Image (spheres, rainbow, N blue to C red):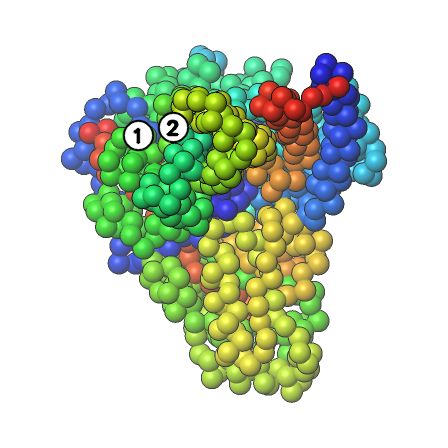
Amino acid sequence: MRLSRTSQALGLAVVVAMSLTACGGGAGENTNATGDATKVITANNTEPQNGLLPANTNEVGGGKVMDLLFSGLVSYDAKGATVNEIADSIETKDSQNYTIKIKSGKVFSDGTAITAQTFVDAWNFGAAAKNAQLNSYFFESIKGYDKVSAEGSTEDKMEGLKVVDDSTFTVELAQPESDFPLRLGYTAFYPLPASAYKDPKAFGQNPIGNGPYKLAEGGWKHDVSIELIPNDKYEGPQKAKNGGVTFTIFNNPDSAYTEVQADNLDILDQVPPSGLQNFKTDFEGRNVNQPYAGNATMVLPSYMPEFKGEAGSMRRQAISMAIDRQQIIDKIFYGNKKAATEFTSPVIDGYEAALPGSEALKFDAAKAKALWEKADAIDPWPAGKVLTITSNIDGAGNKEYITAMANQIATNLGIKAELNPIASFKEMRALVNEKKLTGASRAGWQADYPSLYNFLGPLYGTGAGSNDGDYSNPAFDAKLKEGLAATSVEEGNKIFNQAQEILLKDMPVVPLWYQAVQGVWSNNVNTVEFGWNGVPLYYAVTAK
Amino acid sequence: MVMFTLRRFLQLIPVFFGATLLVYFLVFATPGDPIAALSGGKPMAPAVEAALRAQYNLDQPFWIQYGLYLKNLVTMNLGQTFSGQEVAAVIARAYPVTARLAIMALVFEAFFGVLFGVIAGLRKGKLFDSTVLVASLLVIAVPTFVLGFVLQLVVGVQLGWAKPTVSGSAPWNELILPAVVLGLVSLAYVIRLTRASISENMNADYVRTATAKGLSRRRVVVVHILRNSLIPVVTFLGADLGSLMGGAIVTEGIFNVPGIGNLLYKAILKGESATVVAVVGILVIVFVVANLVVDLLYAVLDPRIRYV
């Protein structure tokens, strides 16, 4: 089956490739683009999985639409830097108590004013257990979240949020978190008009936002298309430069690729695996290949006896060094990817390519074999035990690279290793959540907001929500806490990178490579720029 | 004949319930956790998870889940998808598209299949016959997705004769290409079935009698040979209609047709039992009706067959 888009919508790390040489090749500035500002741009998308409510949209298909319909306190520019949008200022002295002032005169597309109360109500709505919003955990750092989010709780006001006046509110966090302001551009933190609370379900079908676009009348035709038109009440850095964006729902990126070739679709933000080899020639001068804030990793569960203790530590390092990342990149991804040297992403502010200990991510068969034998001397690898790498295979491209990786591990370490194929994503998540993995498993992360912490805290903090391998190291947790309490982002990043040095030793997951977006566009539009998260900057696209 | 039809419809009831029970159980028994997948690997607040489980009765044992499903079914409530849409509305959107595609494919394969089959059968061993035989063999051998992608690229992109994928409203003209791809393989079978049947019946006694009576060749072929040769073809087409109505996952995927095949495939991957069971339930009815129509057609084609 070739319907890989489904699983991508389910939040999977997609198999994409990148090349440093092509970085920024297509993503030039739009300076000479003087296009027709009334023409509608068409782009591919997947059907949003839920109604379009900020706190209930947690996947790519809905996210792309939400980011055009709404704008938050801050927004992210193409490089991932935060820019004040609705916020006039966000101030803190201790990284725990924030005073947020919002610009006056901001309105929703229906004319309703946006005040401090608007944000407080929206966040309380998103956090409260009774509303069962998928993104509710995003509010967990706000004081009082534990009460409103408890099972069966009927409370819906977090004590950490206080309205001072129409344009000011304060946020008290449960603990200092220096990257809190960076999060505020994420979907979950968007404002909601009061009309949304009367019937959230109906609102989700026909949302009213404050972003550069608004939904056309009856614009969401389920499984078919989503039609957005410019919101003339929007003033800000993302003002629409075209006459609207119409998303066509594609179940299969291959057919979307063909449509761009035929100039029937303007933008495709995901070249299918079948096109990776040829897209640069198929779309000469109309393609992009650039890294975005995501990576691919392999989890080595901490609860497996073989990966515990000193011997376990050596094994993790050995497995990492037994993988020839570059060979897989060259052979399977046609050279279009960059091997990982740490746990975050090169597009994130604070990224360091050569952290102490990063040599553990370099291919070295001899060293790997030696380490593996040393580990065996302490605690022998069970005779005949196969190292399995579990992955769902409903997403395109997983099977190929994991099989190659298993072969490398087997050859270089002299053990048996193989892909353990799982039919569907839901089955895979059940295995991971119930801690029933009996070997390695495929994983990856796509940043919610551009910050080093977002690549570390939710994944490797003790008991964190996406800590699939149950990793726990008090020294690492302490470093995270220290980094969050830092008074500046730079200071925090330095500490987060020290935390990464611990990860490089413990290797809770084996970082493989950084994700990149391959996008192509039709002859009908000028150069399309792609953002830090791999999503095209739709608002800036101009028609020829 | 009325009694026969009525009896067949009554048989539908146990078949329908048996099938839904079985399918519901199969979806229930597939490993995995649909709610965990909803969060896409990101964390989910425990209260939210519990609320979602309760909403879809996933916190109940199998029999209670199925019972609640049946209870809703009686009131014509097919339940909701994991995205909170009514299953009935989702199916109502997708089904007409698939039905249109299926009918076009069926007409295509029936018309050309019988036409080529008859000509080939009458001219057995001649150039036309051998060409058709080789061509149909080729079509059978090539997988649908290869045919689909090649035709899409050639007709859709290089020649520009048709839009490579189908737009949302799925108009008839855009469905021609997918319908041809969908019907091609069956077309090959219909040709071969018709040809074999015709060439067999050509030597039958009644044909000799008809010719001896002095009937025109045209009348002999159309009224005597063809009519008697169509029984196996109609059987095949009836079964094919059933499977076409079930949606063609591959073809719908290639041409981005928003039909029932895509819907079912996605629902199975997500473990969305409400959707899967509803779609399969409809398919059961379609199959039973298609088979009934085939049985009734036997009587039309061959007067020796009567139903009481």
Q: Position of residue B181 (x, y in %)?
A: 41, 37
Query: Closer to the observer: label 2 or label 1?
Result: 2
- How far apart in space, not on screen, are marks 2 and 1 (Cα)? 9 Å
Q: Is residue B264 shown above or below B296?
A: below
At label 1, the amino acid type is Ala
- The answer to whether residue A261 is above or below residue A305 is above
Residue A432 percent coordinates (x, y):
65, 54
Q: Nearer the viewer, residue A89 or A385?
A: A385
Amino acid beneath label 2: Ile
- Tally the numbered discs: 2
Residue indicated by mark 1: B162
SS under mark 2: helix
Q: Residues within 10 Å of mark 1 (few under 14, many from 20)?
A: some
- Residue at 60% across, 42% down: B269
Q: Report the chain holding disc 1.
A: B
Residue plotted at (60% across, 48% down): A424
Chain hosting mark 2: B
Assess whether mark 1 and mark 2 are in contact (beta carbons under 8 angstroms). yes
The location of residue A391, given as percent across then percent down, is 57, 57
Residue placed under numbered mark 2 in the picture: B176
Q: In the drawing, does residue A511 fall left or right of residue A286?
A: right
Q: Position of residue A40 (x, y in %)?
A: 30, 24
